[in-house]
Every structure is written in C-alpha cells, then in structure tokens.
Amino acid sequence: MALATDPYVHDDLLDVDVPRSQLLARMIHGGVLSRMIYTACKLGLPDLCARQPRTADELAAATGADADVLDRYLRVLAAAGVFEQDGDGCFHLGATGELLQRDVPGSMWSLAILGAELLEPTPAGALYSARTGRPAFDHAHGCSLYEHLAADPDDDALFARAMTARAARLHATVIDAVDWTGVRHIIDVGGNQGAFLAAVLTHLTDATGVLFDQPHVVAGATGGLAAAGVADRVDVTGGDFFRAVPPGGDLYLIANVLWNWSDERAGEILRHCRAAMASTARLIICEPVLPDDNRPHPSRACDVINLWMNGGRARRLHEWRALLAGAGFDLVQVAETAVEWSVLEASPR
C-alpha cells in the first residue's frame, strides 16, 4: 500500500499513473524480466510455443524444467506481452516474443543469450566501471571482449549471429536513408560477416565491395554472401582497422562499430579510413545519435552496455562532429531513420 505522501508519477512502460514507490520498485527489479527472457530462450520456449500452443506442464516435459516454476516465469512474460495465455491455460508466443525464435529474420534470440551470459556485467562490475571508467568485461575476464571472442569459437559464433540478426532488423530502413548515387566500390570497415554489405549490394546491383574485419570473423562470411547472391562482388579481407584500412573505395561504410570504442580508439579507426580515402570519397556511419536532452532514446542503455563491454560510448551530435574533425573529416549531414540508427555522412577535409 502506498504511503499517503507518495505522489503519483507516470509509468511509461505500463502507460498508467502509479505511486512513485511502485515505479521505483519496478525499476529496481527490472532485471527480473531480462532473466525470464534469457531462461525462455535458453530452454527454447519461443520456438516451442510458435509451433503449437502448450501448457506449462507440456513445456516442462519438453524441456526438463520444473512445471510450477515455468508457469510462474511464463506469467511474468505474458504480462509483458512476450507470451499470451488462452482460456485453456496454453501459452502462445506473443507478437513481441516472435523475434525470440532462433531462426526468424532479425531474431534477437542470440542477443538475449549473449546479454545474460557474457555482455552484461554483475552489479559489482557495473560499480567497477563507475569507479574507474574502465570496461567491466576486462576486469571480470582478464582480457578484452574481442580477445575473448577470438579465443572462444562458440561465443564468437553467437556474437556474429547476433550482429547479423541486428543488420537484418535495421538494414532496409538505413539503406533507404543513404544517397547511393554514383557509388561503385564500397569498403565495409568492421563489417562482421557481411550481412549489411550484402544487403547494400543487393540494392546496388552494379557495385562491388570489400568486407574488412578480423581474419577469424570474416572467415565465416562466405556462406552468407553466397546465399545473398553477392559473393562474386565481394573481396573478403582480414585485417586490423587499428593498423590500416583497405584503399580504393568511393564509399567507406562503418556500421555498428565506432560506439564499441572510446573516442581515442574510434578516432584511430577514422584516421586510418581517412588515410585510405581519396579526397572525393564519402564516409557513411550508421549508428545512433543521442539527443542532447534526457528524453527516452532506444540506445541509451546500449551506451552504458558498450562502456561495460569495451569502453565504448554512444555519442551526441556535437561529440560526433568533434570525433570526425579530429580524424580529418567534416560532417556533411545526418539523416534520422525510423530505427535506432542514424546515418551520418562525412567528407575528407
């Protein structure tokens, strides 16, 4: 029961006015929902319920879980719209939960697993970053995230899958926001396994590209590029963008890369791009641009997650201008999109 002096505030998630203490309690226990999503994905519940609505008892039998606990977990997720329960007690996959299936386009299944098992720190890790300004991941694991991925094929494959799925969710909207006039040869810097580049080349049927990332990352790109029908137009190149970037592109594409790094490290990547670029080449960056004020933005949480993972950050517009200027670029324009990424275009000075 709320105190008589406890004022009501608006809960944006539930879209109702609630006592201040109730809103704060939901925030304090916000991690419960993410743990329920992780558990559901780990047990394969979204795929099971997508194929056929099932009771908690049936799901427990199929997964070896405890039926009572599973029922309680699913009710938490049903209240959030991830699942739905019918009058017969069967759980259906809700519209929000459809992206938690393993193999649907834009699946967030791998991200749910990665977030819980690898990317998000313990409370002590979050406190460590606050006190030191350093990545919690390095402190917990004794190496950087990307060093860990290079040494762990299972986590590396899951990470690549998550990045490919993210590209599938975002690429169509972002591609529509770019002026591709005259583009013939694209250098995709830090392009993972090429899902975004493949989408661009499907759109630009006469263009070619270079997929550039760490050697162990691009080693897994062949199948996806072939499936997209663009393998014959892509030069897959392994390397280190902290040392050099391939020359010769008329457009350099950096998507979902720079916010993984501090300003110092992101500046290094951009300076290597500038060194490789002709004066007439263009730079396209696809990443969030945070608002200057504190209104909600879908990438605010990722700002601190990137800090915890690798010392990275999301940036506001004036921070983008400064970062680009320091690497020898002028920011030409910024296009907002219907998704969390914006498109920044820069030109060499």
Image (cartoon, grey):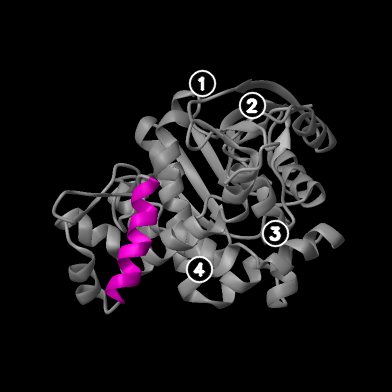
Whichever of callouts 1 and 3 sits on the residue coming sooner in the sequence is: 1
Distance (Cα) linking label 3 and label 2: 28 Å
Picture residue at 39% right of the left edge, 30% below the top: 204
The residue under label 3 is 308
- For the residue pair 31 and 134, the one nearer the viewer reads as 31
Measuring from the top left, give residue 253's x and y in whole percent. 57, 38
Label 4 or label 3, whichever comes before in sequence order: 4
Q: Earlier in the sequence, mark 1 or mark 4?
A: 4
71 is higher (above) or lower (below) than 169: below
- Foreground label between 2 and 4: 4
The CA distance from mark 4 to mark 3 is 18 Å
Instruction: Locate the C terminus by quadrant.
Output: top right
Q: Are marks 2 and 4 in contact (CB under 8 Å)?
A: no
Disc number lying in front (3 or 2): 3
Query: Which one is nearer the viewer's eye here, 289 or 123?
Result: 123
When asked about the image quadrant of residue 334, the answer is top right
Can you identify the residue that label 2 sits on? 345
Find the magenta span and give its range.
66-80
Picture disc at residue 179? 1
Disc 1 versus disc 3: nearer the observer: 3
> Disc 4 marks which amino acid?
Asp
